[in-house]
Amino acid sequence: MRDNQTRSDPSDAKSPSRPARAAPVRRAIGVLTALLTASASLPAYAQEKAPNIIRDAEIEQLMREYTAPIFRAANINAGATRIFLIGDRSFNAFVANGQKIFINVGALMESKTPNEIIGVLAHESGHIAGGHLARQRQELAKAQILMVAGMLMGAGAVVATARSGPYGKVGSDGVGTMGALLGPAEMVRRSLLAYQRGEEQAADRAAVNYLTATGQSGQGLLTTMERFQNDALFKTSQIDPYTMSHPLPSDRISSLQAAVKASPHFTTKDPAERQARHDLMRAKLFGFVATASEVARRYGPADQSLPAKYARAISAYRAGKLDVALTQTDALIAAQPGNPYFQEFKGQALMESGRSVQALPYLRRAAALAPSATPIKVLLGHALIGTGNPNDAKEATNLLAQVTQREDDYGEAWQYLAMAYERRGDTPNAQLASAQALFLQGNMIAARTQADRAQKQFAKGSPGWLKADDILNYRPPKFD
């Protein structure tokens, strides 16, 4: 854009024809970039910056249970598919980077029944099973060809217009350039948006099929669409539906209602045990995410349900009322001694308040009750480091090394592993683990600095040397 502005000034133009030829090509790149961004499946905040990923053992386990039957019905490999929680209170979910489902905590907080979230997850599974991301890349590649072809055609028109103006300017008002550019850009954009709307409708139909195949109702999916319709009621009346990436909520509801109501499982309700765990999950999120006043309004003292007590205990802890929070958590543990997440919360509250030694029994109990819960193991490793005991530091090293071997993209685990190695005086491995954590944060300068320091202390060709070398020689992928 800067080049175009500069060269439109007659005093800067070195050749009457070269500015006119360069303008469409450079602007084509900018328009195409904007077009691809507008057509991407990620929401705006995810395009602008890395989303705030939240790890929570209780919620992750529940999401695995919600998706397990859906994945089987969709023939999706559950082992190759991951669900990520995003710290955003808007109601949204999307698929990105292959078989990764991202779901906002806001969607979980606003969903009153498991079926509502299961419907959302079934829809996103439809995108995965349908190969929509791969096909969308193909459509974008086609769009690039169409765009370039349109720009080249427009370039000829611009050159002709420019030559008729003084000093090689694009006419007197730039209309020639914009007319040549906006035509193909708008045509391709609408084509891509139409394709994306078709994918959304296909994912809706697939979701209904998966829910029916697993004996579940599609009512939750309809409820979600109705929520979107209410949110969009005053936003879409003046919007051209052909410029939207998703079908209008009212259109989606119309096309879904018949199929959902025709299912023999339309009136099927969520099992009571599942609903109870869903209510606990929502209470936990409100306790950690909402303000104290919002928690008090939603879960007032008159509400003596387990979810209400859970939300109030977490809110009290966040407000610095540790004794109140611990007392309330003890009541939760007494009500459900086999619930690993009540044990986890008490351990977390103690550990984060500087009482790591007192936290260990609760975190060990939580880890024993939920042996596959990686976030609990990371929390336990953190607490072990905090005791100052050399034996605990050794246990933390072993525990966190196992975690990072299974999930090498768990940045927090790498941070604590670096601390554990440092406590044991193992500087090379501490620097290497710190480099891994910094690498995952995107801080490449600091990551390479730590990797360089670590590599110099490892024998050349050893596993540690090679891992450091991978970081030192990493180059981000380039997208044409």
Image (spheres, grey):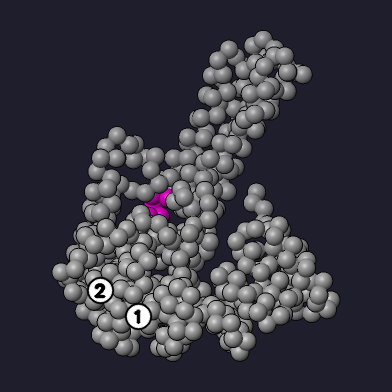
**In what quadrant of the picture does the N terminus appear?**
top right
- Near mark 1 (Cα within 10 A), the count class, few <14, some 14-19 or many ≥20, is many
**Could you say whether the residue bearing mark 1 is in a helix, strand or loop?**
helix
Q: Quadrant of residue 22?
A: top right
The residue tagged 1 is 342
In this view of the protein, which residue sits in the foreground, 34 or 114? 114
Q: Residue 297 location, x and y as percent?
A: 21, 60
Is 252 placed left or right of 158 in the picture? left
Q: How many marks?
A: 2
- Residue 124 horizontal side relative to residue 24, left or right: left
Residue 230 appearing in the image: yes
Residue 38 at what x, y percent from top left? 48, 44
**Which segment is the magenta one?**
196-200
Local crowd size for mark 2, using a 10 Å CA cut-off: few (<14), some (14–19), many (≥20): many
Residue at 21 percent of width and 79 percent of height: 272
Amino acid type of the residue that numbered disc 1 sits on in the rendered structure: Phe
Q: Which residue is mark 2?
A: 309
The amino acid type found where label 2 is placed reads Lys
The residue at 68%/82% (across/down) is: 424
